[in-house]
């Protein structure tokens, strides 16, 4: 508008200057141009931010209402409870985490006097195809007892017993004697047969009170208990001993040996328990065998009931080595459809553990070879390591647990089934042996005269199972299984 008004003014001045006095009419003034009306913009009111909603706190899991609400809570406890509270905790825990939670029976809590009685009944009642209970691995311990067992020790004499599987035959033999233990110092040996306990005939005594007395002697609760036993030894003689119970530390790795054969050195070691304390001696043994240039390994797991899967994973890695295990699954633990799926347990990576890099291994096994020990077999087969089993059928426990404490007691219920890198985990009836041979109680473990080890070496040399009478006869223990705590026959998923 400013530029347009200036131009009009200049034009009017030019017209006036050109006019004469001839009386011509002046120009009609031009009306000013009005600017267009401006529509006022109403002020904008800033929006009011919405009031934040108070955070919604999800309801606490039902199990927290009953956790550690204990019937024996001390006076003044902030969370006193009842036996019913403890039972409710177990019911909810199993309902949410038990592998076969759909098969749990509907039990009347009031029908069970104690929490332990209730827990023992709260499991699947179904049977396997072979007629065995589907769940044979449901148990609990006091927290103190579990701490002792998981530490790799025991209160006793340093004896691992074998018992007959025939119900009508009470026949116990010594499988192993811990070096330096009360039993070893008294002269007891592998293969000794138990004759009397506290002067009573072990095989024939049936009186309930007498049986209780014998059990108390065989399984002492405290260190310093003194009990009398008599055994028959392999030479036919009898040995009477008085043993004083003690806290015995069980060495999980023993008898590491370099066996010289016509086709090169072979390593041997006895591995008895997958406890955390086993890692260092296992690594030392494998390093010793690696440095000796072993061509093959005989791993004796015949009495190894299991334990930590992390230890089983490392044993498998030290056998196979980094090339065969890189990026592969040792075990995948399957859960029920209520639980969050777990990540696979991978073989170690960038590990400082020694390894042998073997593509085959010979494992001495039997009914005492369970859980985490079977995971070694299954994990290696999942990455195509050739595993030869010599001895007997393994126990058949492809399951894992997370020990769960409440009110002074630790509970064990099946929560996982383990499968290998190929997805296989169906061995509830155990792994069959490559060469079926009876356990040989006449020779010490690691002796080349011991039948299972000798058979493994013959299999290695010839590629077939020997059929000699000695191999078939072996010892006298085809029907013997280890006598041990239920917690000694489990696989524990110890990942955090």
Image (spheres, helix red, strand yellow):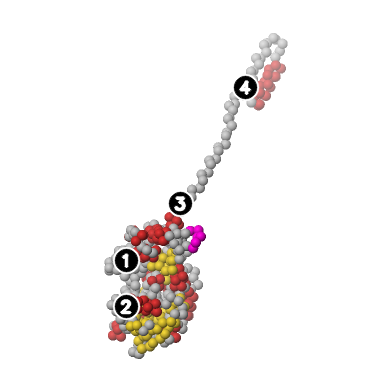
Instruction: State the residue position of label 4.
Output: 34
Marks 2 and 4 sit apart, C-alpha to C-alpha, by: 126 Å
Residue 207: assigned label: 2
Task: Look at discs 4 and 3 and give the one toward the viewer.
Answer: 3
Instruction: State the residue position of label 3.
Output: 59
Task: Look at discs 2 and 1 and give the one toward the viewer.
Answer: 2
Marks 1 and 4 sit apart, C-alpha to C-alpha, by: 100 Å
Q: Residues within 10 Å of mark 2 (few under 14, many from 20)?
A: few
Q: Position of residue 399 (x, y in %)?
A: 37, 67
- For image coordinates 49% across by 70% down, the residue present is 351
Task: Look at discs 1 and 4 and give the one toward the viewer.
Answer: 1
Q: Which residues are magenta?
A: 74-79
Whether 75 is drawn above or below 464: the answer is above
At mark 1, the secondary structure is loop
- For image coordinates 57% across by 36% down, the residue present is 46
Marks 2 and 1 sit apart, C-alpha to C-alpha, by: 32 Å
Q: Position of residue 70 (x, y in %)?
A: 45, 61
Marks 3 and 1 sit apart, C-alpha to C-alpha, by: 35 Å
At mark 3, the secondary structure is loop
Instruction: State the residue position of label 1.
Output: 134
Task: Look at discs 2 and 3 and give the one toward the viewer.
Answer: 2
Q: How many marks?
A: 4
Whether 34 is drawn above or below 400: the answer is above
Q: Position of residue 31 (x, y in %)?
A: 64, 18
Cβ atoms under marks 4 and 3 closer than 8 Å: no
């Amino acid at each position: 508008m400013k530029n347009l008004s200036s131009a009009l003014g200049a034009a009017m001045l030019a017209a006036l200057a050109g006019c004469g006095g001839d009386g011509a009419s002046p120009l009609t003034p031009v009306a000013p141009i009005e600017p267009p009306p401006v529509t006022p913009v109403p002020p904008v009111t800033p929006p009011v931010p919405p009031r934040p909603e108070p955070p919604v706190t999800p309801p606490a899991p039902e199990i927290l209402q009953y956790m550690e609400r204990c019937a024996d809570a001390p006076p003044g406890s902030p969370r006193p409870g009842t036996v019913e509270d403890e039972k409710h905790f177990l019911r909810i825990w199993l309902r949410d985490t038990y592998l076969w939670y759909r098969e749990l029976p509907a039990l009347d809590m009031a029908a069970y006097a104690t929490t332990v009685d209730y827990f023992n009944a709260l499991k699947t009642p179904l049977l396997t195809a072979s007629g065995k209970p589907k769940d044979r691995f449901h148990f609990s311990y006091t927290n103190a007892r579990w701490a002792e067992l998981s530490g790799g020790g025991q209160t006793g004499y340093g004896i691992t017993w074998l018992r007959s599987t025939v119900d009508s035959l009470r026949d116990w033999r010594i499988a192993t004697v811990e070096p330096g233990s009360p039993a070893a110092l008294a002269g007891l040996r592998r293969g000794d047969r138990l004759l009397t306990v506290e002067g009573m005939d072990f095989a024939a005594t049936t009186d309930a009170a007498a049986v209780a007395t014998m059990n108390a002697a065989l399984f002492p609760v405290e260190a310093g208990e003194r009990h009398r036993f008599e055994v028959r030894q392999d030479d036919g003689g009898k040995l009477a001993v008085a043993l004083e119970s003690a806290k015995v530390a069980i060495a999980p790795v023993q008898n590491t040996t370099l066996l010289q054969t016509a086709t090169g050195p072979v390593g041997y070691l006895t591995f008895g328990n997958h406890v955390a304390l086993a890692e260092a001696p296992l690594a030392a043994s494998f390093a010793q065998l690696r440095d000796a240039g072993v061509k093959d390994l005989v791993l004796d797991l015949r009495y190894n009931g299991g334990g930590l899967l992390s230890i089983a994973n490392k044993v498998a890695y030290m056998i196979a080595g980094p090339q065969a295990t890189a990026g592969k699954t040792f075990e995948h633990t399957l859960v029920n459809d209520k639980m969050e799926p777990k990540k696979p347990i991978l073989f170690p990576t960038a590990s400082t553990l020694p390894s042998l890099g073997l593509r085959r291994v010979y494992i001495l096994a039997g009914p005492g070879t369970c859980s985490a020990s079977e995971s070694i077999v299954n994990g290696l087969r999942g990455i195509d390591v050739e595993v030869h089993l010599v001895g007997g059928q393994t126990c058949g426990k492809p399951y894992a647990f997370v020990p769960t404490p409440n009110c002074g007691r630790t509970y064990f219920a099946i929560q996982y089934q383990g499968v290998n890198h190929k997805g296989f985990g169906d061995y509830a009836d155990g792994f069959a042996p490559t060469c079926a041979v009876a356990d040989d109680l006449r020779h010490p473990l690691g002796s080349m005269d011991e039948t299972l080890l000798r058979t493994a070496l013959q299999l290695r040399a010839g590629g077939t199972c020997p059929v000699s009478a000695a191999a078939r006869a072996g010892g006298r223990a085809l029907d013997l299984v280890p006598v041990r705590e239920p917690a000694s026959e489990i696989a524990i998923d110890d990942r955090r």
